[in-house]
Image: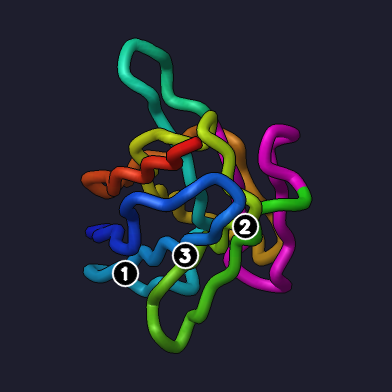
Amino acid sequence: VQLVESGGGLQQAGGSLILSCAASGDIFSNYAMGWFRQTRGKEREFVSAISRGLGRTFYAESVKGRFTISRDNAKNTVYLQMNSLKPEDTAVYFCTARWSNDVESYYINGYPYWGQGTQVTVSS
């Protein structure tokens, strides 16, 4: 499966951005999806995950209450709505996919498919 992120950019602290990730190459609804982020010199950090069905979601503590992950299986797209942005949210954000035979499971690791990333910069 191929993943292409979009929607990154520059935003002031307290503002909002929405990231999109378009998937192609396989049946999107068979895949659990996730978002990770990485700052230069640091390891990639889990941000959020969503199950392939039933809309079950999970968030890192650092973004809980501010970010919302969602998906539209008809559009083969997963989204990350980011509100109340903070300078520490500045990073390259990656969309990820993992085939799942379980409609209600989400995953915080073990993703074999990754997008190229989109830069999010939050100014103070």
Q: Position of residue 12 (x, y in %)?
A: 47, 49
Q: Is residue 15 above or below residue 61?
A: below
Residue type, label 1: Ala
Residue type, label 3: Ile
Q: Position of residue 3 (x, y in %)?
A: 27, 58
**Residue for badge 2:** 83
Whole-angstrom CA distance, mark 1 to mark 3, is 13 Å
Q: Which residue corresponds to the image point at 58% horizontal and 39% vertical from the top-left?
A: 86
Label 2 vs 1, first from the N-terminus:
1
Most extreme residue toward the front is 124
Q: Is residue 118 above or below residue 43?
A: below
Q: Can residue 92 be seen in this snapshot?
A: yes
Q: Which mark is residue 18?
A: 3
**Residue for badge 1:** 22
Asked if the residues shown at circle 3 and circle 2 are in contact, with their CB atoms under 8 angstroms apart, the answer is no
- SS of the residue at dot 2? loop
Q: Magenta span has 111?
A: no
Q: Position of residue 94 (x, y in %)?
A: 37, 44
Q: Residues within 10 Å of mark 3 (few under 14, many from 20)?
A: some
65 left or right of 49 in image: right
Disc 2 or disc 1, which is closer to the eye?
2
Q: Quadrant of the N terminus?
A: bottom left
Q: Position of residue 111 (x, y in %)?
A: 43, 40
What is the magenta range?
46-64
90 left or right of 7 in image: right
Disc 1 or disc 3, which is closer to the eye?
3
Q: Which residue corresponds to the image point at 48% horizontal and 80% vertical from the top-left?
A: 73
- SS of the residue at dot 1? strand
Whole-angstrom CA distance, mark 3 to mark 2, is 8 Å
Asked if the residues shown at circle 1 and circle 3 are in contact, with their CB atoms under 8 angstroms apart, the answer is no
